[in-house]
Image (tube, helix red, strand yellow):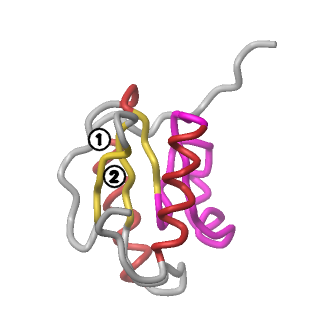
Amino acid sequence: MANCIGPASLLHQTLRAMAIAWEPSWGVVTSDEHRDRVSEFADVGTFVGWVTYLARQRGAVPPLPAPVHVEPVEDKETLIVLTPERFTSTRPEHVALAAQVRERLDQAGLLKPLHAAPS
């Protein structure tokens, strides 16, 4: 495990393992409450959570503000942990940090909706 510490550690490890096993384009760990709070960005692939995974094909992750922890996931791209402490949508500083990170990732063209493959 990399440098992630605190309550985010188990979620970090879980999303990391899923990214390695399934190689998704995007993955997120967040609460329904946080997703609903950012409902304008709630399309799959368009928002960030406590822990977010972005595959290489989405593009390079720009510098992000502290305390955000960014690390590579093997050769598959990037895992982003907003804060090592428990993320909650009732803490204004957490919501503001998530919005700031979402904006930077969106400006870099990394947050696009995922589309289901044609059947």
Q: Which segment did they paint magenta?
A: 22-51
Q: Is residue 73 left or right of 31 when viewed as pictured?
A: left
Q: Farthest left residue?
A: 63
Q: Are marks 1 and 2 in contact (CB under 8 Å)?
A: yes
Which residue position holds label 1? 107
Question: Between residues 83 and 93, which one lies in front from this camera angle?
Answer: 83
Q: Amino acid at mark 1?
A: Gln
Q: Is residue 53 left or right of residue 97?
A: right
Q: Is residue 57 above or below residue 15?
A: above
Query: Quadrant where the N terminus lies?
Result: bottom left
- Please state if 89 lies on the left or on the right of 54 as rendered: right
From the top left corner, tell me how far across and down residue 56 is, in percent. 37, 31
* Residue found 60% across the figure and 36% down from its top: 22
Residue 73 percent coordinates (x, y): 37, 45
- In magenta stretch: residue 37: yes
Image quarter of residue 36? bottom right
| Gap in angstroms between the C-alphas marked 1 and 2 | 6 Å
Q: For this rendering, which residue is in front, 83 or 110?
A: 83
Indicate the quadrant containing the C terminus: top left, top right, bottom left or bottom right.
top right
Secondary structure beneath dot 1 equals helix
Q: Residue at x 52, y 81 (%)?
A: 88
Residue 18 position within the rendered picture, expressed as x and y whole percent measured from the top left: 58, 47
Image coords of residue 106 (percent x, y): 36, 43
Residue at 22% x, 58% y: name it.
64
Q: Is residue 26 left or right of residue 97?
A: right
Identify residue for label 2: 103
**Quadrant housing residue 82:** bottom left
Looking at the rendered structure, which numbered label has been put on residue 38? none
Q: Residue furthest right?
A: 119
Between 40 and 89, the residue placed more toward the observer is: 89
